[in-house]
């Protein structure tokens, strides 16, 4: 992978998937993954490799894997855990993970051979490119109460407990619970992603979000409009043109001062590459240079989010990770 084309190296991607990058670098990696199909595919392959290794480890005695193979798997896991504890610097963790993954690949080759000899095979179901919309039913959550609970999980209960809750139905978003504090929580779907995102039509995407009153008035309408256009069967090009016209005619509002959103749910699934990611807060402002927020600078917790970058919406969005999930439990150390 060339650093001229990508913001991250393979070693850093491995460290990111292991939760071992600093917060600022992890959020930069998320931003890059959101827009890079090649890196999304690579990340999905790495995740699949890890899952396959765990599955094969459980099945070792079923396929009569030798004691030497058992020992090799155990050694690999021990080295991985030791690496996390013994190497405090990111650079050292990256080199450790590089050798861990190299060892994992070697073990995988042996395991594949053993499984083929026993007539067993595994189906590769990783997919990070969604060229067209799936049947609409795949984007719905059948259990209405489950969707309400997921929407509330976007923010601490002290906020979401009195918030208005929207759920997605076949006619679009509808009010499930009336609110009292001006906040609005819902579960966004994949079409809120950048229009050039490989996961724009990913039916697995579930993104619990809780907008504060300013964002509920000025940012939430964009989610509602995109959903209406999807239901109307518009193409991406038509949606882009419609959004541009909406801002030109002042039918769509500019972000209000103080507009922000809570995304602190451990139940969210952002895309195939990053999965649940980490709890974070989103801030929306009219188009501005990221330097005005100190975004993406060394040791800065603020990162430019790509959701509206290069899109028809004249909005700049920043993300700031936080240390806890909405339920108060500690988030993974990034």
Image (cartoon, grey):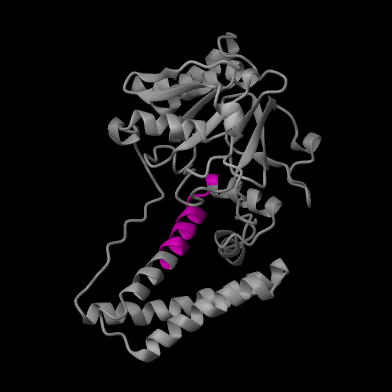
Point out residue 86 in the picture as x, y percentages from the top left corner: 68, 76
25 left or right of 223 in image: right
Residue 71 colored in magenta in the image? no
Q: Which quadrant of the view contains residue 293?
A: top right
Report x, y in % for residue 305.
63, 39
Q: Is 50 rendered above or below residue 258?
A: below
Q: Quadrant of residue 201?
A: top left
Q: Which residue: 45% across, 22% down?
A: 166
Q: For the magenta stretch, what is the residue range?
A: 34-49
Residue sitting at x 79%, y 40%: 294
Q: Is residue 28 visible?
A: yes
> What's the magenta bit mostly, secondary-structure-wise?
helix
Image location of residue 40, percent across then percent down: 48, 53
Q: Quadrant of the C terminus?
A: bottom right
Say if 7 sits above or below 313 in the image.
Answer: below
x, y percent for residue 180: 57, 15
User: How many numbered tags mark residues here?
Assistant: 0
Q: Is residue 191 above or below residue 273?
A: above
Q: Is residue 43 magenta?
A: yes
Residue located 64% across and 48% down the image: 27
Q: In terms of image quadrants, where is residue 89?
A: bottom right
Q: Residue at x 63, y 70 (%)?
A: 84
Is residue 133 among what the camera can see?
no
Among all residues in the image, which is located at the extreme left?
A: 119
The residue nearer to you, when weighing 310 against 55, is 55
Q: Is residue 93 left or right of residue 327?
A: right
- Is 328 in front, or is 155? 328
Which of the two residues, 193 or 247, is positioned nearer the viewer here? 193
- Who is closer to the viewer here, 15 or 149? 149
């Amino acid at each position: 992978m060339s650093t001229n084309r990508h913001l991250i190296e393979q070693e850093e991607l491995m460290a990111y998937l292991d939760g071992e990058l600093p917060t600022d670098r992890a959020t930069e990696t998320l931003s890059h993954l959101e827009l890079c199909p090649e890196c999304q595919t690579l990340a999905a392959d790495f995740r699949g490799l890890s899952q396959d290794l765990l599955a094969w480890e459980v099945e070792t005695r079923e396929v009569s894997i030798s004691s030497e193979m058992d020992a090799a798997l155990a050694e690999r896991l021990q080295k991985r855990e030791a690496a996390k504890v013994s190497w405090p610097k990111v650079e050292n963790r990256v080199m450790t993970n590089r050798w861990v993954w190299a060892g994992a690949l070697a073990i995988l080759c042996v395991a594949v051979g053993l499984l083929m000899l026993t007539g067993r095979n595994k189906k590769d179901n990783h997919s990070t490119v969604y060229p067209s919309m799936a049947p609409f039913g795949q984007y719905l959550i059948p259990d209405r109460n489950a969707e309400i609970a997921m929407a509330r999980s976007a923010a601490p209960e002290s906020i979401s407990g009195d918030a208005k809750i929207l759920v997605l139905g076949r006619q679009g978003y509808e009010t499930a619970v009336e609110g009292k504090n001006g906040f609005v929580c819902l579960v966004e779907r994949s079409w809120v992603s950048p229009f050039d995102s490989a996961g724009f039509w990913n039916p697995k995407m579930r993104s619990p979000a809780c907008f504060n009153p300013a964002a509920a008035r000025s940012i939430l309408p964009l989610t509602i409009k995109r959903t209406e256009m999807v239901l109307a069967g518009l193409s991406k090009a038509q949606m882009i043109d419609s959004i541009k016209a909406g801002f030109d005619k002042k039918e769509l509002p500019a972000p209000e001062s103080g507009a922000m959103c809570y995304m602190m749910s451990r139940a969210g699934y952002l895309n195939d590459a990053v999965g649940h990611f980490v709890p974070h807060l989103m801030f929306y402002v009219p188009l501005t240079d990221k330097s005005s927020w100190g975004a993406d600078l060394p040791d800065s917790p603020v990162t430019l989010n790509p959701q509206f970058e290069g899109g028809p919406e004249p909005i700049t969005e920043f993300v700031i990770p936080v240390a806890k999930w909405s339920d108060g439990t500690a988030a993974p150390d990034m």
